[in-house]
Image (tube, rainbow, N blue to C red):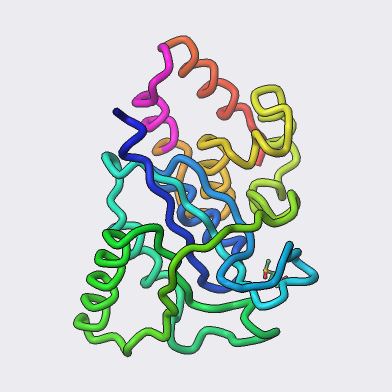
Amino acid sequence: MRNNSIQSVTMGMGCFWSPDALFGQIAGVIRTRVGFAGGTTDNPTYRQLGDHTEVVEVDFDSVNVKLETILQVFWSAHNPVNINDYKGRQYKSLVLFRDPEQLRIISEVMKSYEEQGNETPDTEVAPFSGFYIAEDRHQKYYLKRFPDAIDKLRPLFPTEEELTNATLAARLNGLSKGYTNMEKIIKEIRTWHLNGEEQEEIIHLIKRIKW
Ligand code: MHO
């Protein structure tokens, strides 16, 4: 039931470190991962992107946050006209849709962005055809600038993959970049589907992080 409301959308808007933090702090976003998409070459890496673009892949629960909201953030948080076209397609304004309904919403939000008096975006809108996850050092990049945060989170998320996939790490990555605050995160944790004791344990742990 609940799972039917989970969606993913993949967006390129320049260097992927900031979008990871920006979308990661939105309540309703479950997971963010950065990587490469939108091209045709096999197995891109940060040093060998081929014709791919740096993207963030956002998994969200559409009951708690609408795709419209995510896309409004997308267009307001980068310049979709003058985006750096440097090193081929590395930095591009790009949205990859999963189904016709997403395409409809993307077109609508893009149109309303223009109608607000903005220049026509150069955003490329294309069907999603695969996502290649970037190296661990690029995931939750800003959070990883705080070694004490990583040390304290490690027991909860023993592997890099678990840390990358964690909603809590996404929120704290947003905090590390200054996009949200601890009060807001704690308030949200109290709404998570965990028992009261688990919630308080997490809150206790993140309050002790030295930033
Ligand atoms: N080379 C730029 C952007 C990195 S981003 C992952 C920098 O060091 O800030 O493309």
Residue 142 drawn above or below residue 182 = below
Does residue 81 show up magenta in the picture?
Answer: no
Residue at (43, 51) in percent of width and height: 8
Residue closest to the eye, 83 or 178: 83
x and y, in percent, of residue 149 in the image: 67, 36
Q: Quadrant of the N terminus?
A: top left
Counting from the top left corner in percent of width and height, residue 152 is at 69, 28
Check the image and report above or below for 42 versus 80: above
In the shown orientation, is residue 135 left or right of residue 59?
right
Is 4 on the left or on the right of 139, as rendered? left
What residue appears at the point 53 percent right and 48 percent down from the top-left corner? 32
- Membership of 189 in magenta stretch: yes
Segment colored magenta: 185-195
The picture quadrant where one finds residue 115 is bottom left
Residue 27 in view of the camera: no
- Tell me if residue 112 can be seen: yes
